[in-house]
Amino acid sequence: MLLTQVLEGLPARVLRDGAVTGFGPLSMNREGLLHYFADPRFTDQLQRLAGHGAVLTTKDLAALVPQGFALALCEDPRELFLAAYLRHGASLELSGPVPNAIASSASIHPLAVIAEHGVTIGERVSIGANAVIHERVSIEDDAVIGANSVIGGEGFEVGMLAGRQRLVPHYGSVLIRRGAVIQCNVSVDRGLYGGVTEIGEDSVIDNLVHVAHNVRIGRNCQVIAHAMIGGSTQIGDGARIGPNATVSNGLNIGNSARITLGAVVTRDVEDGGHVSGNFAIAHARFLDNLRALRR
């Protein structure tokens, strides 16, 4: 679909037309996406985009958009992006219904709910009572989904349109890798803007954990009870997220990183890093501060 078609009837002026194959934020680097650019603080992110797509921005920011991108101007790029997405997101990002593919060796409790289409369940997968598996979910061999967990539900993204809050539809997917264990009452949201939420091979997610849209958790990770992982955060192999920890959105948590119980993480954590506190700092520094308070 051309940018002129995507924005037809909306208050925008197309300066350079081009093909649009989907929607996404500047952090989503994929060919053909329509992005919005409303804040010069994200110029570096815009400049790092590879390939070609389309950008919706204001007259004042237009000169910062690379020449290779289709370009349209408007007064409020964020709101107009949402309006276009609500009109065309489903048609651009969803294919037709795909039949379920469920291995005969899978053990699915009679009270579990499996979507009528778009679900792939591998060999020896176990799904507990009252678990809900939505469409566009793939569960690889030997994975476990505990009772009352919801895999592939709608995520939380809110936009404003004509002065009203609107939940942004999620047309992405979920991938549960081989041998991953998701215990009871866990929520794993499906990807936003065609993205993928992924739980890595042999990782273990404890009870009452929330994994937001577009999160990618690596291999052999542990995410312990009541933890919350914010949208689009990347967690490396072997990381350990402690009980009741909060990890903000859009972060990179390194391989073998450790996040202590109750920590509130608002910055990236390097490979092998260990952070504690609210807001989280290096664990050694946290202990030094604690000792100083006790003197």
Image (tube, helix red, strand yellow):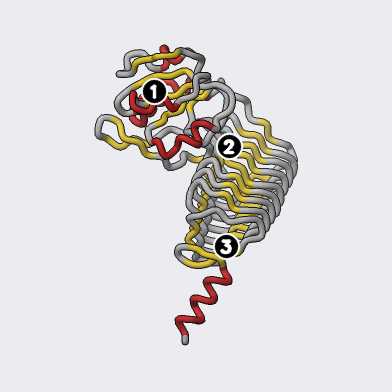
Across and down, in percent, residue 253 comes to 59, 53
Q: Is residue 126 something one can see in this rendering?
A: no
Mark 3, Cα crowd under 10 Å, few <14 / some 14-19 / many 20+, is many
Tell me the CA gap for discs 1 and 2.
21 Å
Mark 2 vs mark 3: which is more N-terminal?
Answer: 2
Tell me the CA gap for discs 3 and 1.
39 Å
Q: Nearer the viewer, residue 170 or 277?
A: 277
Across and down, in percent, residue 12 comes to 33, 18
Mark 1 highlights which residue?
84
Q: Is residue 169 above or below residue 269?
A: above
> Mark 2 or mark 3: which is in front?
3
Q: In the drawing, does residue 176 fall left or right of residue 184? A: right
Q: Residue at x 39, y 19 (%)?
A: 72
Q: Secondary structure at mark 1?
A: helix
Mark 3 vs mark 1: which is more N-terminal?
Answer: 1
Where residue 196 is drawn, which disc sits there?
A: 2
Q: Residue at x 51, y 36 (%)?
A: 27
Q: Are marks 3 and 1 in contact (CB under 8 Å)?
A: no
Q: Is residue 80 something one can see in this rendering?
A: yes
Amino acid type, callout 1: Ala
Where residue 146 is drawn, which disc sits there?
A: none
Where residue 259 is drawn, which disc sits there?
A: 3
Mark 1 vs mark 2: which is more N-terminal?
Answer: 1
Q: In the drawing, does residue 264 fall left or right of residue 133? A: left
Q: In the drawing, does residue 219 fall left or right of residue 37? A: right
Q: Are marks 2 and 3 in contact (CB under 8 Å)?
A: no
Amino acid type, callout 3: Ile
Q: Residue at x 70, y 45 (%)?
A: 125
Across and down, in percent, residue 39 comes to 38, 36
Mark 2, Cα crowd under 10 Å, few <14 / some 14-19 / many 20+, is many
Amino acid type, callout 2: Val
Total tally of numbered discs in the picture: 3
